[in-house]
Image (cartoon, helix red, strand yellow):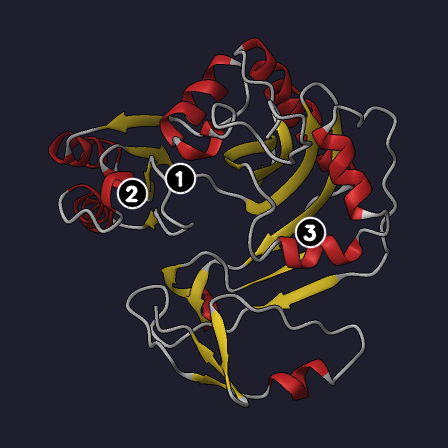
């Protein structure tokens, strides 16, 4: 699209490897001094399990490739970590995404997400958010792509935002230029807030779901103007206006998610939910309308 003279918002394939390969992402952070957890990369299950036994638990096991936000296990025991390695590398539940895995130290702190726009060289901060990953109430159940979110994140103070920008986002933008992969688009930074400052958990190269649903409604500046400026290298000097109100999103998922889930089930109560307030918006993903009914897609 860019070669054809069409402005396109988002990173090139080369720049998108910040998310597409956790191995590349972690090596990049180490190279450019972005604070991150200690880690090791493995292509064989047995050596990965030996590392787990050596380090002990808690410990974090991640697929290097993309796994729809579900390729991460925070293992509280060695056995749980070994099972996660087997699921990724032996059972290959996420296919080729788990052929290479990253095992990280467990970090103690509070997690949040921070978003920024980049046009290659200029960084414009967006907002913070926090999502809830566990599938069930009480912070229990398997890891998901996100069961809900809110923005802004209370843990991300003005001081913490400046620390994230100076220690993570700006060095990343500069590093990508040095790599010959200048980053254009939205950078989603997964952050662990610790007593010593922010530590980068991961990068995503998109708005994220369900974080996008709570960040975009708070932005009062015209979204098209912002995205066009990022895609054409014109972010310098841009100031964004935000609503002081908070935003909250709750996800309704099919029974069984994130594993094998029911398909074709009827979703009820949508009209009533939308009618509770003019500030309530119902977003759809993976649904279809059949006559008067809204159903979960069967595919």
The residue that disc 3 covers is: 153
Q: Residue at x 79, y 72 (%)?
A: 279
Secondary element at tag 3: loop
CB under 8 Å between discs 2 and 1: yes
Residue 297, placed above or below residue 72? below
Q: Nearer the viewer, residue 87 or 164?
A: 87
Q: Position of residue 204 (x, y in %)?
A: 52, 38
Is 8 above or below relative to 83? above
Residue 140 visible in the shown view: yes
Image location of residue 254, percent across then percent down: 41, 75
Who comes first in sequence, dot 2 or dot 1?
2
Q: Quadrant of the N terminus?
A: top right
Asked whether residue 159 appears in the rendered view, the answer is: no
Chain-order first, disc 2 or disc 3: 2
Tell me which residue sits at (88%, 35%) in the image. 239
Camera-side residue of 47 and 23: 23
Q: Alpha-carbon neighbours of circle 2 within 10 Å: few (<14), some, or many (≥20)?
A: some
Secondary structure state at the residue bearing disc 1: loop
Q: Secondary structure at mark 2?
A: loop
Q: Earlier in the sequence, mark 1 or mark 3?
A: 1
**Mark 1 vs 3: CB contact within 8 A:** no
Q: CA distance from mark 2 to mark 1?
A: 8 Å
Of labels 2 and 3, the one closer to you: 3
Residue 159, horizontal then vertical, whole percent: 76, 35
Crowding at label 3, few (<14), some or many (≥20) Cα neighbours within 10 Å? Answer: some
Task: Report the side of 251 relative to 185 (left or right).
Answer: left
Label ID, residue 106: 1
Which image quadrant for residue 78? top left
Circle 2 residue: 57
In terms of image quadrants, where is residue 299? bottom left
How far is the residue under mark 2 from the one under mark 3? 28 Å
């Amino acid at each position: 699209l860019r070669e054809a003279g069409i402005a396109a918002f988002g990173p090139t394939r080369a720049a998108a490897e910040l998310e597409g390969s956790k191995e590349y992402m972690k090596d990049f952070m180490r190279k450019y001094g972005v604070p991150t957890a200690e880690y090791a990369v493995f292509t064989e299950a047995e050596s990965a399990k030996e590392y787990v036994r050596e380090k002990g638990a808690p410990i974090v096991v991640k697929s290097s490739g993309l796994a729809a936000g579900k390729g991460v296990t925070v293992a509280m025991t060695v056995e749980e970590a070994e099972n996660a390695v087997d699921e990724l590398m032996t059972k290959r539940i996420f296919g080729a995404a788990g052929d290479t895995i990253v095992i990280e130290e467990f970090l103690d702190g509070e997690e949040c997400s921070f978003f920024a726009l980049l046009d290659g060289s200029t960084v414009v901060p967006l907002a913070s958010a926090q999502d809830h990953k566990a599938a069930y109430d009480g912070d229990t159940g398997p890891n998901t792509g996100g069961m809900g979110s809110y923005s802004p994140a209370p843990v991300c103070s003005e001081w913490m935002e400046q620390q994230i920008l100076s220690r993570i986002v700006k060095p990343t933008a500069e590093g990508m230029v040095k790599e010959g992969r200048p980053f254009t688009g939205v950078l989603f930074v997964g952050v662990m807030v610790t007593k010593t400052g922010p530590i980068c958990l991961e990068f995503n190269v998109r708005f994220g779901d369900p974080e996008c649903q709570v960040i975009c409604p708070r932005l009062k500046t015209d979204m098209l103007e912002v995205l066009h400026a990022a895609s054409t290298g014109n972010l310098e000097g841009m100031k964004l206006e935000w609503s002081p109100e908070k935003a909250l999103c709750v996800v309704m998922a099919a029974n069984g998610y994130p594993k094998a889930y029911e398909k074709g089930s009827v979703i009820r109560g949508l009209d009533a939910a939308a009618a509770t307030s003019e500030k309530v918006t119902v977003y759809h993903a993976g649904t279809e309308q059949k006559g008067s009914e809204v159903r979960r897609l069967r595919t």
